[in-house]
Structure formats: structure tokens, C-alpha cells
Image (tube, helix red, strand yellow):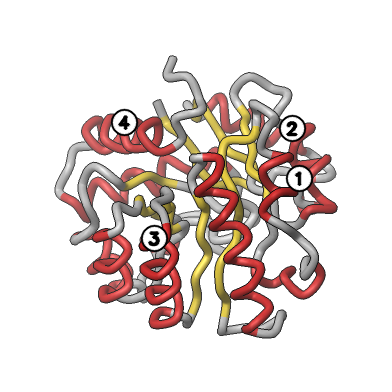
Amino acid sequence: MLIDSHVNLHAPQFDEDREAVIARARAAGVGLMVNICDKIPNFPAVRALADQPDIWCTVGAHPHEAKDHTDLTARALTDFAADPRVVGIGETGLDFHYDLSPRDIQAAVFRQHIAAARETGLPLVVHTREADQVMGDMLEEEHARGAFRILMHCYTSGAELAARAAALGAWFSVSGIATFKAAEDVRSVVRDMPADRIIVETDCPYLAPVPHRGRRNEPAYLPDVLVKLAEIRGWSRDEAEARTEAAFFALFNRIPHP
């Protein structure tokens, strides 16, 4: 089964043809999708799409949105996560590239998400950009307080952070960035990821893979990501599909395996 572990189907870029996008994904063999919450005010729209049997969702606030979520608590997140269609906490984390929220606020909001992941047992969907040292320190510090499951989504950070996260048992998702000509550094890290903890995603409508680069991304393009992952790791396409499926269900274990 092809599984898109990170879609943003509620995004306004899909307002004109959302149902057609979902239909094309299914026609391309995508059997499951996880719709990712970027901010709490969007959760109703995120959750509404998860009424479909092959779409699930998460709850959380992206680090860009942290400044508007200073009162978000772990308890509020766990309350949302009581919904059985919610299968992860996030997207959350640290983004020191754009700094759209102050760094201390990003960290404080991130810690609330970590506490919710620890409490619920649901995987924490982590966004990290240009924050390798701080991210590694925070994950190790929080993990020492009590274990929680980690997904380093759309991983493009360095090898050192990857190794630190892997030592904590983290999973990693590979996106269309791995197909970009200039992304050899990303491919180098992908080669060393734990083979049983790699999954794939589109992060649509962003980051369309080659040969669709420059277009709006959509889940139907996921096979191009899988083929590139197989090439990087030296797997057959069937092996890559089987490995990423097994890794996905090991991580998102609230979702019944068909």
C-alpha cells in the first residue's frame, strides 16, 4: 500500500478541486493519507476530511503559528486527541529559518505538544529547520523525562540531528525534496536512516517532486517520492512500498492495519 503520511488537503490551494485531488490520489494507488493540522482554528476543517475511511488526521500548531498559541496546553491537545480519527500530535517543532514566531515561544508551545504525545502515546509530528542543536537538545531532554514517539517529518536537517533522533527511536519521512537535483545532502542522510523507520509523504500542496516540480503538489505524486527512495536505498519499488507501509503502521498504530 502507498501511504501519504503528510498531506494538507484542507489548504486553500485545494478549494477549487479538493474531491478531484483525492480521487486522483486513490487512482494512483494511495491507500491512506494523514491530513496534518497546522493550527488549532483549522482543526475542524482538518478533522472533517478525516470522516473518509482512508483519511486520518492530527492536531497541533506549526511553529510558524506558535505566537498565536501561547495558551495552548497539553490538556487541550489530549482532549482533541480523544477523537479516534486523530492519530498524531502536531505538526509542531522549531523553525529558525523564518522565525515567524519568537524562538522561546516556539519552544514553549513545542513542549506542550511533547507532553501531549507522551500522555496519549500518539506520534509527535516534528518540523525542524535550521534548529538542529536546539532540537536535538530538547528531544533528548524531554525523552529523558518520559518516552514518546517521534516522527521527523520531511527530514532535511543534518546528519548529526538525524543520528540523535534515531538514537531516541525516531521515524523519518522522506518527501519530494529527495528528488531535487541540488538535494544530494538530503539523499546522503536518507541513505543512513534506520531502514525500518522510514516512511514517505508529499507535504502537498508544497514540495512537488521531480518531474512535477514547480506545480502544486498533490498525493497522486507520491509514487515519484517512493521510486526515489527506492533508488537511494538500493531497494526495489515493491520492497520500498512494503518497508514504508510496515514502518507507517508501526508508528501510527491507532490506525488499523488493513
> What kind of residue is marked 4?
Ala
Label 4, secondary structure: give it: helix
Circle nearer the viewer, 4 or 1: 4
Whether 111 is drawn above or below 85: the answer is below
How far apart are the two marked residues, 1 and 3, measured between alpha carbons?
A: 32 Å
Whether 59 is drawn above or below 29: the answer is below
Tell me which residue sits at (36%, 70%) in the image. Answer: 181
Q: Position of residue 13 (x, y in %)?
A: 77, 53
> Could you classify mark 2 by the number of other residues whose Cα lies within 10 Å: few (under 14), some (14-19), or many (20 or more)?
some
Among the 4 quarters of the image, the one containing residue 258: top left
Q: Which tag, 2 or 4, sits closer to the chain's start? A: 2
> What kind of residue is marked 1?
His
How far apart are the two marked residues, 4 and 1, measured between alpha carbons?
A: 27 Å
Q: Does the image show residue 50?
A: yes
Q: Are marks 1 and 2 in contact (CB under 8 Å)?
A: yes
Q: Which tag, 4 or 1, sits closer to the chain's start? A: 1
Return the residue at label 3: 143
Q: Which tag, 4 or 3, sits closer to the chain's start? A: 3
Q: Nearer the viewer, residue 64 or 26?
A: 64
